[in-house]
């Protein structure tokens, strides 16, 4: 074989190889960029109804100015939530043996140093244990593990759930009326841990757009000092894909005043004096509410406003994301 024949052979090999490589790249791009199909196996769903006292009382002019709009899917999962937990189940899991007493709209269990309150309407509960904390030693990781174990025991999360630590702080409780936040170098006897949850990689938020859904306090002796949150398990039993609105469509609804104002980082007196809100970011999230049996997607818009007195205000507004 002379040099010319060798060069021709190499050329004939390179062209098919390049063609095959191009097919692989195009195929990979299509596979990873394709949108999920809208299965809609739960049937036709109504977009989640979002209510807020703030939105009812505060009316503003809304503008949207998002410089870098994040890429959003055309369809995403709707998750069927696990059934809510009854107050009696919580009480049993927390070691209460007696019956509850009704105080207003709440149920109360009280034994020695322990107290549990539960609202059948909102599903909000709060457990506290005033027993003195014994001496002990606990690392951050051990405290988080202990908190997770307790939440699993109560049925509030699944063992394979997408639970994540949003915040962890060290406390000194002692015999004080109010716990003190302490730095790592200072004396402490407890941990305050806030947990969030993700569904399909997206944050699940509460009705006030808060990502901290469950709070657990752990003593260095591994005792549970406090748990608060909603008696709605952060886990789901089934899922199906549904089409969602585009960011552009949701933004237009926001401009028309169809958004629900759910959070204002300012005193109410200041919020009442807001005139115009400028929304500068948007995020696809899921809403945790006791009014719907699904985790439904919502667009969370963040913005700012200046009150008539010149005070700077941060706001959060929700738009249901499910396409109608």
Image: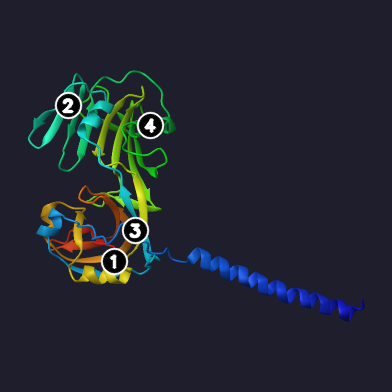
- What's the colour scheme? rainbow
Dot 2 alpha-carbon crowd within 10 angstroms: few under 14, some 14 to 19, many 20 or more = many
Res 323 label = 1
Residue 23: % across, % down: 62, 71
Q: Do the residues bearing badges 2 and 4 touch, measured as CB atoms within 8 Å? A: no
Q: Is residue 110 above or below residue 304?
A: above
Q: Do the residues bearing badges 4 and 3 touch, measured as CB atoms within 8 Å? A: no
Q: What secondary structure is found at the residue carrying circle 4? A: helix
Q: Nearer the viewer, mark 3 or mark 2?
A: 3
Relative to the observer, which residue lies in front, 289 or 309? Answer: 289
Q: CA distance from mark 1 to mark 4?
A: 38 Å
Q: CA distance from mark 2 to mark 4?
A: 22 Å
Which residue is most to the left?
104
Dot 3 alpha-carbon crowd within 10 angstroms: few under 14, some 14 to 19, many 20 or more = few
Residue at position x 89%, y 78% in the image:
3
Q: Nearer the viewer, mark 1 or mark 3?
A: 3
Q: What secondary structure is found at the residue carrying circle 1? A: loop
Residue 318: % across, % down: 24, 59
Res 109 label = 2
């Amino acid at each position: 074989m002379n040099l010319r024949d060798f060069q021709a052979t190499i050329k004939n090999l390179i062209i098919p190889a390049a063609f095959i490589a191009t097919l692989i790249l195009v195929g990979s791009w299509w596979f990873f960029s394709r949108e999920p199909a809208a299965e809609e196996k739960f049937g036709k769903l109504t977009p989640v109804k979002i209510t807020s006292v703030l939105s009812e009382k505060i009316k503003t002019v809304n503008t949207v100015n998002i410089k870098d709009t994040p890429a959003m899917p055309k369809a995403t999962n709707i998750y069927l939530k696990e059934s809510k937990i009854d107050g009696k189940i919580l009480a049993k899991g927390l070691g209460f043996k007696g019956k509850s007493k009704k105080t207003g709209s709440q149920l109360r269990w009280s034994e020695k140093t322990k107290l549990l309150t539960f609202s059948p309407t909102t599903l909000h509960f709060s457990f506290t244990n005033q027993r003195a904390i014994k001496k002990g030693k606990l690392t951050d990781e051990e405290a988080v593990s202990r908190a997770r174990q307790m939440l699993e025991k109560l049925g509030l999360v699944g063992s394979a759930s997408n639970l994540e630590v949003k915040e962890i702080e060290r406390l000194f409780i002692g015999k004080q009326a109010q716990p003190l936040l302490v730095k790592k170098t200072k004396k402490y006897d407890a941990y305050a841990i806030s947990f969030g949850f993700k569904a399909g990689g997206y944050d699940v938020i509460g009705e006030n757009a808060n990502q901290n859904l469950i709070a657990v306090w752990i003593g260095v002796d591994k005792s549970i000092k406090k748990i608060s949150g909603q008696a709605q398990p952060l886990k789901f039993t089934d899922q199906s894909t549904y089409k969602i609105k585009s960011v552009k469509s949701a933004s237009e609804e926001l401009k028309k005043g169809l958004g629900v104002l759910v959070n204002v980082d300012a005193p109410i007196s200041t919020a009442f004096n807001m005139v115009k809100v400028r929304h500068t970011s948007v995020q696809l999230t899921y809403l945790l509410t006791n009014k719907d049996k699904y985790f439904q997607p919502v667009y969370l818009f963040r913005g700012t406003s200046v009150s008539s007195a010149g005070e700077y205000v941060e706001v959060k507004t929700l738009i249901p994301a499910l396409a109608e």
